[in-house]
């Protein structure tokens, strides 16, 4: 019996470790612009192809502290024509006045006022829907106001969007369809203990349980995933999928927007954008805990996923390290102890690989079991609150 328990925990720990190891090479960065430029004749210089113009769309609510660096970072973009539209979502600070000053200094910047928020809409989805309709160009790049783009980011994202999707290694394998929605995960700035401990869990869940290679070959809705901080699409595909109006009550556009594209028969993709953009998602414990709960019910904290993911995550990251000392103290057979020791080492492996790849700090690896336990506790808190009819967690002064 003890050996069966040990083997079960070894399996649960090995699953995300092997998946992260397999997924990391598939979680590639955006193509260099040269990779999609047409080849020139040997006697002629390579032509430089300018990507089509892009509308960069930024929803902003009480962003006076960060809107200037966000807009200026986009304005510094190279190799692409663009416009920047900022929607002021009923800010109570100087966000609108600051953007107006930026617009007077550079005609590429435009401010629009957000309409009154309907009772059945989420604030961000409402803002993004109106931004899309205000855009002049066919390319739509949605970014959050706390995202800081690198000068080559927009050009490289467009190049990646347009790159032929021939990921399949062998000709007999099916080729994935062209992308209609591309999402990028910016580099996560995590200066505090809370952020280093909890923020990289998004990579752990994504890379530990979503097969990226299959995601690119299969339009199955459940394989859709993305990061709400950075989305690139075309107007025609956006409208065909229903855009943000199709997820109007959602708080989790990172998950729900790719899924409505897939329901419309369109392909979505996601990449590592850590060399193109950076973001500080939350700041300190209060912000981290609130942020992890605000859209949990649309992720794991629902009746369909809460139990299986609790088993998967606790079994991979918490139970092995708790069971090993118990087994040693109570004199379990050596074979069981050895298997548990292997499971314990494997439970740290995914976070170690993530820390090495994304430079997220080794503290998160050391405290990974605590992070997983806290994450699951928060999911259950949101689930039980929802089941008992409680109000959603407020975010930026709203519960919608």
Image (cartoon, rainbow, N blue to C red):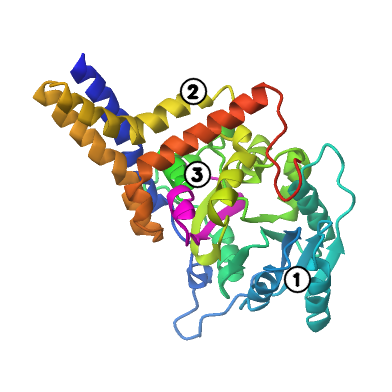
> Looking at this view, is 268 or 203 the one in front?
203
Other-residue count near label 2 (Cα within 10 Å), few / some / many at <14 / 14–19 / ≥20: some
Quadrant (top left, top right, bottom left, bottom right) of the N terminus = top left
Tell me the crowding category of disc 3: few under 14, some 14 to 19, or many 20 or more residues within 10 angstroms, Cα based. Answer: many
Indicate which disc, 2 or 1, sits on the residue closer to the N terminus: 1
Badge 1 or badge 3: first in the primary sequence: 1
Find out whether residue 176 is within the magenta segment.
yes
Q: Which residue is mark 3?
A: 216
Nearer mark to the viewer, of 1 and 3: 1
- How many marks the image carries: the answer is 3
Nearer the observer, 92 or 296: 92
User: Which residue shows up at 58% across the image and 75% down it?
Assistant: 151
User: In the image, is 335 to the left or to the right of 380?
Assistant: left
From what the image shows, is residue 390 above or below residue 23?
Answer: above
Viewer-nearest of discs 2 and 1: 2
Q: CA distance from mark 3 to mark 2?
A: 28 Å
- Give the number of the disc on residue 170: none
Q: Residue furthest top?
A: 1
Location of residue 278 in the rendering, given as x and y in whole percent from the top left corner: 54, 64
Residue range of the region highlighted in magenta in the rendering = 173-199
Callouts 1 and 3 close, C-beta under 8 Å: no
Q: Which mark is residue 83?
A: 1
Quick check: can you spot residue 213? no
Marks 1 and 3, how far apart in space?
30 Å
Q: Taking 301 as reference, is 128 above or below it?
A: below
Tag 1, which secondary structure?
strand
Q: Residue at x 33, y 51 (%)?
A: 353
- Residue labelled with disc 2: 307
Mark 3 or mark 2: whose residue is earlier in sequence:
3
Q: Position of residue 134 (x, y in %)?
A: 84, 60
């Amino acid at each position: 019996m003890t050996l069966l328990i040990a083997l079960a925990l070894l399996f649960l720990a090995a699953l995300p470790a092997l998946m992260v190891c397999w997924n990391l090479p598939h979680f590639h960065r955006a193509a260099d612009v040269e990779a999609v430029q047409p080849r020139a004749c040997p006697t002629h210089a390579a032509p430089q192809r300018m990507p089509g113009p892009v509308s960069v769309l930024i929803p902003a609510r009480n962003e006076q502290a960060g809107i200037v660096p966000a807009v200026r970072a986009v304005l510094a973009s190279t190799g692409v024509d663009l416009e920047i539209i900022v929607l002021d979502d009923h800010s109570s600070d100087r966000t609108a006045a600051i953007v107006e000053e930026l617009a007077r200094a550079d005609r590429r910047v435009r401010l629009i006022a957000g309409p009154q928020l309907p009772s059945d809409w989420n604030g961000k989805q409402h803002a993004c829907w109106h931004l899309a309709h205000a855009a002049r160009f066919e390319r739509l790049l949605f970014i959050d106001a706390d995202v800081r783009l690198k000068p080559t980011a927009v050009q490289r994202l467009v190049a990646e969007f347009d790159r032929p999707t021939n990921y399949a290694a062998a000709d007999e394998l099916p080729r994935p369809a062209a992308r209609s929605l591309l999402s990028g995960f910016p580099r996560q700035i995590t200066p505090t203990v809370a952020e280093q401990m909890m923020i990289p869990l998004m990579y752990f869940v994504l890379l530990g349980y979503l097969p990226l290679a299959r995601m690119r070959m299969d339009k199955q809705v459940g394989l859709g995933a993305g990061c709400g901080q950075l989305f690139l699409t075309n107007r025609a595909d956006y409208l065909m999928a229903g855009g943000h109006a199709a997820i109007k009550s959602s708080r989790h556009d990172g998950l729900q927007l790719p899924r409505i594209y897939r329901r419309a028969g369109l392909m979505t993709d996601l990449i590592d954008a850590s060399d193109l953009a950076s973001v500080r998602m939350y700041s300190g414990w209060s912000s981290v805990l609130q942020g992890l709960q605000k859209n949990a019910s649309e992720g794991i904290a629902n009746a369909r996923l809460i139990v299986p993911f609790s088993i998967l995550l606790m079994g991979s990251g918490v139970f092995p390290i708790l069971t090993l000392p118990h087994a040693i103290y109570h004199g379990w057979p050596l074979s069981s102890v050895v298997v548990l020791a292997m499971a314990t080492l494997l439970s740290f492996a995914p976070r170690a690989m993530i820390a090495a790849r994304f430079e997220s700090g080794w503290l998160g690896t050391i405290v990974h079991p605590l992070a997983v336990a806290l994450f699951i506790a928060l999911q259950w808190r949101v689930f039980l609150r929802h089941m008992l009819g409680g109000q959603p967690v407020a975010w930026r002064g709203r519960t919608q």
